[in-house]
Amino acid sequence: MADVTPSTSKKKSGKAKPAPKGKAKAPEAKTNGNSTDATGLRTKTDRPLTSSRQDLALDQSTKISSSDVCVFYGDKQALFDVNVDILSNHVTALIGPSGCGKSTYLRCLNRMNDVIDIARVTGNIIVDGIDIYDPDVDVVELRARVGMVFQKPNPFPKSIYENIAYGPRIHGLASSKSDMDEIVENSLKRAGLWKEVHDRLHEPGTGLSGGQQQRLCIARAIAISPSVILMDEPCSALDPIATAIVEELIEELRQNYTIVIVTHSMQQAARVSQRTAYFHLGYLVEYGETDQIFQAPKDERTQNYITGRIG
Amino acid sequence: MVGYLFLAIAIISLAGFYAGRSKAQTSVGKLSELHSLPNFHGGFIAAWIGIPSIIVVLLWLLFQGTVIDNLLLSSLPADKVEGMDQAQLSLVLSEVRSVAAGNIFGDPEPHIIAAAERYNSWYSISRWSMVAVALAMCLIALLFTRSKISGRFRARHRVERIMDGIMVVCSVIAILTTFGIVVSLLVEALRFFDLVSPLEFFFGLNWEPQIAIRADQVTGGGAFGAIPVFIGTLQIAFLAMSVATPLGLFSAIYLTEYSGPRFRKAIKPVLEILAGIPTVVYGFFAVLVVAPSMREFGATIGLDIAPNSALAAGAVMGIMLIPFVSSLSDDAISSVPDAMRHGSYGLGATKGETIIKVLLPAALPGIMGGILLATSRAIGETMIVVMAAGIIATLTMNPLEPVTTVTVQIVTLLIGDTEFDNPKTLAAFALGLVLFVVTLMLNILAQRVVRKYRERYE
Ligand SMILES: Nc1ncnc2c1ncn2[C@@H]1O[C@H](COP(=O)(O)OP(=O)(O)OP(=O)(O)O)[C@@H](O)[C@H]1O
Ligand SMILES: [Mg+2]
């Protein structure tokens, strides 16, 4: 934990963005009400709005901030005091050797660890100023805003069309059949799957190839327009062309959404992300600008990993 | 005798197994030079020793009786059997047999005594030659197959082929048995339809199958219109399923998706105890508890409920069927991979939405299987209905009145009667045929439904 490089972007998360959905108290108040001191510490540190990658003219408000996040699976601790601030309209890449806790951390961000019986999460995670582990928070609503693409493609045993329509239908996003058709078509197009499946939308989604299923799951996740999209190795089964399409999609989504992506490909992390976090054995070792992580890593373990000596 | 022979064959087979194994092991320097593992060589020899000799013994036992009987008949002095017909001959035969067995009644004629002695000696000759043949076959098989064993001998493929053969034989036996049952059912049912027109049976509204004990009695013919019986069966099955399906399905959903693991562990066996209660006990329960309390309750709201009613029988049968529906649904729902649940939760679905839109469709084949299994149990159930719904075939749709079902009628038709020559007893076969056809169609329908709605997951 001593190695953890603190988040470089520390600013008042609450002031940059209005508290959403009228549900939250002012984030500042929220933080104060919270007994965890670390949160208070971080949000009070002001920092000017600068970034080394100035191609991004968007503001750098914190979308998600996590402090002292620990995760236990039964008695086994899988994550140790992770502190990361994820910025709005940024792509944040999580890298690290297999089993280091990337998926575990990602699942904390939309409380998908809740559905794993033995998992227990401690610490604070604030999304849009709301502590998402607060008992008042509606998990269902949270997951509609923080969407997820799972590591293993898991299409429902339904038709391709129904797979995409599932989310919009439960959230009432389409008012008519033609609306729904449009959402389905759009989502499939953006995930780069439309051409392959447009003439067999009513065949089962489980009949697709592994890579097609992966894109189907991406399309399914973006169909409900979440404001944060968590992607767990979305390109692991894709060829270079489909990967390029997904990376383009990520770049495009960044205009409006915040993206966290787990990847085992250094090149991909370097290509698509603005920030990178390196995890090692459950610890967040280093977090910062992607350029800095890849060109001048501060920690030896990061250095070893990105040059191919670990993992 | 035969038991000892089978024991001997088994011992020789076992010996052959070890002989083959050790020969295979010693025939090569290293075990890896063998084409097949030593056990396959042993199995090959054991199969060739055991299977043919056992088949021969079984065939021998099957035919020796007929052969000896025929020999015996032709050896009887011609003047004694002159002009006898089949029935008389078989009477003579059985007399010879009982004398041979030592049961002598009165004074048997000398030619019968002589025949009985021949009979006994032929039997022992036959038996000993059977033993000799079987053992000889075992030994020949042992020598012959053992000589074939060598390092490159493909014992694995041979054993595989023998296993294939055994499996084919087993499935043929199962199929032939089913076929035989269907044919006998069909033949007897056709005899019934010779006596009673199918039109009356399938469309008649009056079921009074009693037959006069003497031909001149007034109750005479009897009526064989089976509609009331069919209606009663459907009514009770429907009542039972409308109790069992929601209770079973909802408890399965609760157990898999909502309850904690400890509660689930405690409650599942309890639910399965329901399946272990004998149906007679359910019958008691229906007659002694459910029916009277229904009657009382009916009286307070001004309804006249018969002491035997379809409702009591159906409701209790429904309770009995809960575990069929719940345990199969439970298995089906819990075998849907967690990835499906996570995918649905990840899209912001609630538990209820996930269950209705993802889990139930994915588990549908299993759930349908459970429901159909329970339905065929409901149609075939006898005991509860005999006790709680009665045996009188009333044509009614009112669940508060007594009705009867196909199985109950089959039982009442056959009780005390073993002569299958009048329409009363033959009617049982016609009912059985209908039951069989209905269950078969139910199964086919189930498979169609399941195939149509099957949703596959990886
Ligand atoms: N459901 C679970 N139950 C128990 N332990 C788990 C569970 N999920 C993850 N773990 C453990 O937590 C640790 C981190 O797992 P995680 O899946 O987050 O790794 P990861 O970084 O995503 O690895 P990969 O790159 O292989 O996907 C591992 O040691 C793993 O064994
Ligand atoms: Mg992972």
Image (cartoon, coloured by chain):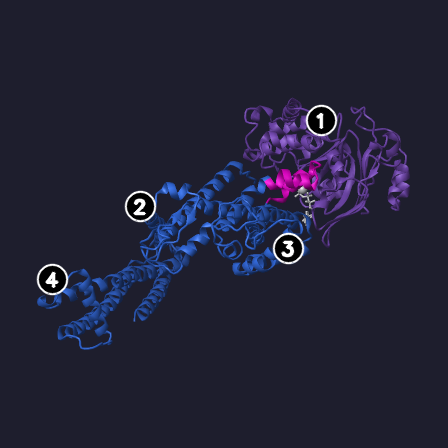
- Characterize the magenta stretch by its predominant secondary structure: helix
Chain letter of the purple region: A
Are tags 2 and 4 found on a single chain? yes
Which residue is tagged 4?
A: B83
Front of the two marks 1 and 2: 2
Q: Are marks 3 and 4 in contact (CB under 8 Å)?
A: no
**Secondary structure found at label 3:** helix
Which residue is tagged 2?
A: B194
Q: Quadrant of ligand 2?
A: top right
- For the residue pair B134 and B91, the one nearer the viewer reads as B91
| Structural distance between the alpha carbons of marks 3 and 4 | 74 Å
Disc 4 marks which amino acid? Gly
Which residue is tagged 3?
A: B296
Residue A251: assigned label:
1
Q: Is residue B57 left or right of residue A166?
A: left
Of the numbered discs 3 and 4, the one sitting upstream in the chain is: 4
